[in-house]
Amino acid sequence: MAVLLQHQFKPLPADKQVDTCSFLDSVSHLPSFFDCLGATIFSPIKADITGNITKIRNVYETNPTKFKTLQQILEGEKEMHGPQWPKVGATLALMWLKRGLKFIQVLLQSISDGERDEQNPNHIKVNITKAYEIALKKYHGWVVQKLFQAALCAAPYKDDFLKALSKGHNVKEEECIEKIRQFLVNYTTTIEAIYVMYNKMGAELDYKA
């Protein structure tokens, strides 16, 4: 579980503003999560997340004081880019990044809730499928959706996945699940706050990749 707990997301303040520096520090360690699922089959999602983190960081580093929170980045780019916004810059990158983060959140929540295929209880295909359908499917064209279905065949078994999350250490499943729940508390709150921000600012776009 070291993959998740070594870089916990911090609690949000009362106003639910997400500190950009803290967010980037925590999220920059998440691409390795996809290695636990199978580096090859999920490499496109991993690459997208890595690329979008870099784009957001590049904008933040141009003016860390001005862009102290994620909302300040969106507000600054809206003013800067006018009618081209929100399909530009860090705003667009964060829009796609939050979907990848949502995929992780739904997958882990589904596993921690005990959702499974009763015929194949050690498979996590049902959890991965749920995460994909909720977080990403509607934004992907037919070809990408078919590629994902094919990739599911190579999904790891649950015990192998949990062992990978624990960096190869044999940890009891109950302990892993408890640590996943611990990780999800601040992580889920952060993801939800970003989604709310996008809806309030009218920054959400529904086009397919």
Image (cartoon, rainbow, N blue to C red):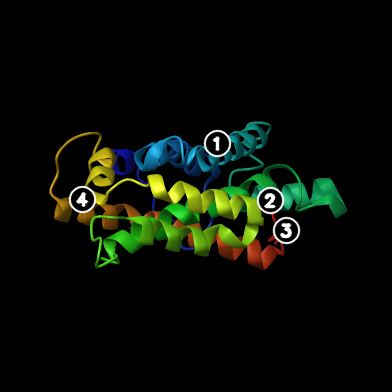
Q: Do the residues labelled 2 and 1 touch (CB within 8 Å)?
A: no
* Among the 4 quarters of the image, the one containing residue 68: top right
Q: Is residue 135 left or right of residue 56?
A: left
**Residue beneath label 3, please?**
207
Pick whichever of labels 4 and 2 is earlier in the sequence. Answer: 4
Q: How crowded is mark 3: few (under 14 residues within 10 Å), some or many (20 or more)?
A: few
Which amino acid type corresponds to the residue marked 2 in the rendered image?
Ala
* Extreme residue toward the right, this view: 83
161 vs 32, nearest the viewer: 161
Can residue 103 be seen in this snapshot? yes
Does dot 4 land on a helix, a strand or a loop? Answer: helix
| First in sequence: mark 1 vs mark 4 | 1
Sequence order check, earlier mark of 2 and 1: 1
- Report whether 36 appears left or right of 54: left
Q: Distance between the residues labelled 1 and 4?
A: 26 Å
Residue plotted at (21% across, 50% down): 176
Whether tag 4 and tag 2 are in contact, CB under 8 A, the answer is no
User: Dot 3: what SS?
Assistant: loop
The spot of residue 55 in percent (x, y) is 64, 36
In the picture of the structure, the residue carrying the numbered disc 1 is 47
Residue lying at 69% horizontally and 63% vertically, measured from the top left: 201
Please tell me whether mark 3 or mark 4 is closer to you in this view. Answer: 3
At horizontal 59% and vertical 33% (from top left) the residue drawn is 54
- Residue 198 is drawn in which quadrant? bottom right
Image coordinates of residue 133 in percent, x first then y, are 51, 63
